Image (cartoon, rainbow, N blue to C red):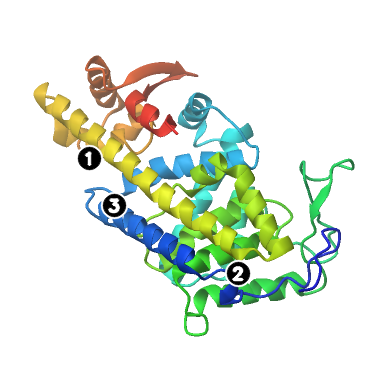
Amino acid sequence: MEAYDRHTPYNQLPPLPPETSLYLDEEVGAKLVQASRRLAELKGLAATLPNQTIFVNTIALREAKASSAIENIFTTDDELYRRLSYQEDDYLEGPAKEILHYREALWKGFQDIKKEKNLSVETVVDIFHQVKQTHEGIRPYQAEIVIKKRGWGSLIAETVYTPPRGKGVVEKKMAEWIDFLNDDSAFPIDPLLKMAMAHYQFEAIHPFRDGNGRTGRILCIIYLIQKGLLDLPILYLSAYILQNKDAYYYALNSVTGLRNWKAWILYMLEAVSQTSEYTIEKINRIRSLMEKTERLIRENKLPLARLNLSKLFEQPYIRSKNLMSDTIKSVNTAKKYLNQLEGLGLLTKERIGKEYIWFNTELMAILSDQ
């Protein structure tokens, strides 16, 4: 193996897949079985839900927040929900804006893969555009991008990696990356193993100036949907990475410097396994809260059919206009029902700007519980 120099563009980055001797053994096989079973359990549970889309918004919001935090984009849950509740239709500032763009990018990728069936460079660029709110594409070959230990552009920071560079180099490696993921005849490898390998390769190619980490984590989920391991983007993968951030970057760097594919694949399989278990627990708690809410509404003889229970769980907050429907046609009627729900202790009301917002505080507590 040619020695790796972190100060030199990694144009010798080998195409996928790595040799089986570098990753495939009994330990990886056992971990793969465990991760596959837990992911299948999550998919099966989601399929039993009467309205799966309400979980997509809530889980996607947590994924967006955690993925942004990995990139040192932080906000509190309280700040995030209040900003989104008041300004989701307007221009957002700060971390809340970044988080909302991530969630929109996740939805964009999901819609694209359901339509196109296979990943493409165009889909990857579309996701990146949504994450970064830019019209840039693959970084220009003359851009001297380096990754430093303490962030980008610091003259005193230590360079830890220099991604591939040169005319047509990144484009060629991205084309190979796409072929590896889409062509199961040429590359007959379990999808979870492929996902792990491809995530490393994407980060190593580093096709964009910025936003590669967030884009890459979305692509992990989108690929699992492409291969039928999930039906919806409800896997909260970034939570595990955030909680094990040092190990994540150590394992990434170990593949680059030492070709230690086994450690990286074990890390990613454990991420899928624990994340599946975590998401199952979240869904069960949210479903239990929905049942409790429905019971209280029935016991207090409120018009459940008119209220549309799912509206109370699509986001951790609701405005009166969000409750309007074919059966609730005026803002005043919507406010009346929301105030009644507040009286039952199901919602709390807060004035934000010129209007009142009702918060589903128990849902917020479930989502905030890491």
User: Which callout, 1 or 3, points at the residue further toward the start of the chain?
Assistant: 3
Q: CA distance from mark 1 to mark 3?
A: 28 Å
Q: Which residue is mark 1?
A: 326
Q: Nearer the viewer, mark 2 or mark 3?
A: 3
Task: Describe the element under mark 3 as helix, strand or loop.
Answer: helix
Q: Amino acid at mark 2?
A: Val
Q: Position of residue 352 (x, y in %)?
A: 47, 19
21 shown above or below 352: below
Q: CA distance from mark 2 to mark 1?
A: 41 Å
Q: Which residue is mark 3?
A: 46
Q: Which residue is mark 2?
A: 121
Quarter occupied by the N terminus: bottom right
Residue beneath the point at 52% across and 84% down: 186
8 lies left or right of 249: right
Quarter occupied by the C terminus: top left
Q: Nearer the viewer, mark 2 or mark 1?
A: 2
Residue beneath the point at 48% across and 72% down: 118
Task: Describe the element under mark 1 as helix, strand or loop.
Answer: loop
Q: Is residue 337 visible from the viewing direction of this image?
A: yes
Quarter of the image holding residue 224?
A: bottom left
User: Which callout, 2 or 1, points at the residue further toward the start of the chain?
Assistant: 2
365 lies left or right of 105: left
